[in-house]
Image: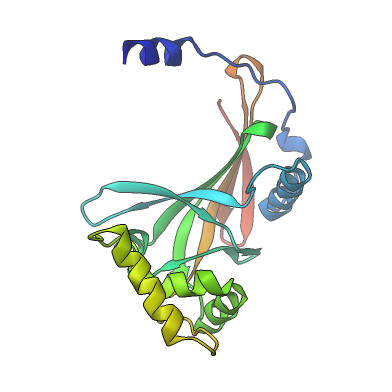
Amino acid sequence: MEDLRNYINSVRRDFSSKSLDEKHVPENPYKLFEKWFEEAVSSQILDPYAMVIATVNKKHQPSTRVVYMRDISENGLVFYTNYHSDKAKDLDENKNISALFFWIELERQIKITGVAEKTSNEMSDAYFASRPRESQIGAWASNQSSILSSRSELEEKVLYYTKLFEGQSVPRPEYWGGYLIKPHSFEFWQGRPNRLHDRIIYTRQSNNWIISRLSP
């Protein structure tokens, strides 16, 4: 453990690739998000749509996990999950949510704060229908976040639902669907030398976005 601690404290890396100037960013944060996302895709970053989301349960205990952003529009960002999962139970108690994209290859982060609400059944149905059949079966087999007695229990449930839906389309379970994150703020972080990073935050006020620079 001591060697690990020494290693962690000895690691140093400087940031130097790009800059971010509040005088030259678009007025709408979705435009800047789109630009950065396209650059992440062009840089062949693995899973650029992966984001860490943070929720808080009724005991005020925060929890984080990685999910995939599956849609984005001026209304917000969408991800899908089991409505019986821990994250869904947290959101039933507290709609506040935070999401973080971290693209280390570009020395960039985007932090989004807002509230989450369930998407329509129609939207969830459409996305579920687009998933690979194996993933559809998995949604039925997994009671997400619940305790399993063994791996074999899960595999037996997969076999059960595979046989149950053999020769037919797999319907969406009523306990599985999407959440729309409706942002209150976007913070764009660009790594800079000497830890003097650029941080530009967009804060929503009524129908407008207020742009500010934050200390690094």
| Residue plotted at (49% across, 85% down) | 171
Q: Quadrant of residue 192?
A: top right
Position of 25 relative to 197 (above/below): below
Q: Is residue 130 rendered to the left or right of residue 22? A: left
Report the residue at 62% width, 64% height from top.
71
Q: Position of residue 123 (x, y in %)?
A: 57, 79
Is residue 117 at least partly visible in the picture?
yes
Q: Quadrant of the N terminus?
A: top left
- Which quadrant: the C terminus? top right
Q: Nearer the viewer, residue 134 or 188?
A: 134
Expressed as whole percent of the image width and height from the top left, the position of residue 213 reads 62, 34
Q: Position of residue 159 (x, y in %)?
A: 40, 75
Q: Is residue 116 left or right of residue 168?
A: left
Question: Who's the residue at 67% across and 32% down the image?
Answer: 105
* 25 left or right of 169 in image: right
Residue 31 at x, y percent in the picture: 73, 53
Label tally = 0
Q: Quadrant of residue 190?
A: top right
Image-based side of 99 in relation to 30, left or right: left
Residue 153: quadrant of the picture: bottom left
Q: Is residue 175 visible?
A: no
Q: Is residue 77 above or below residue 10?
A: below
Q: Residue furthest bottom?
A: 168
Specify how the rendered protein is coloured.
Answer: rainbow
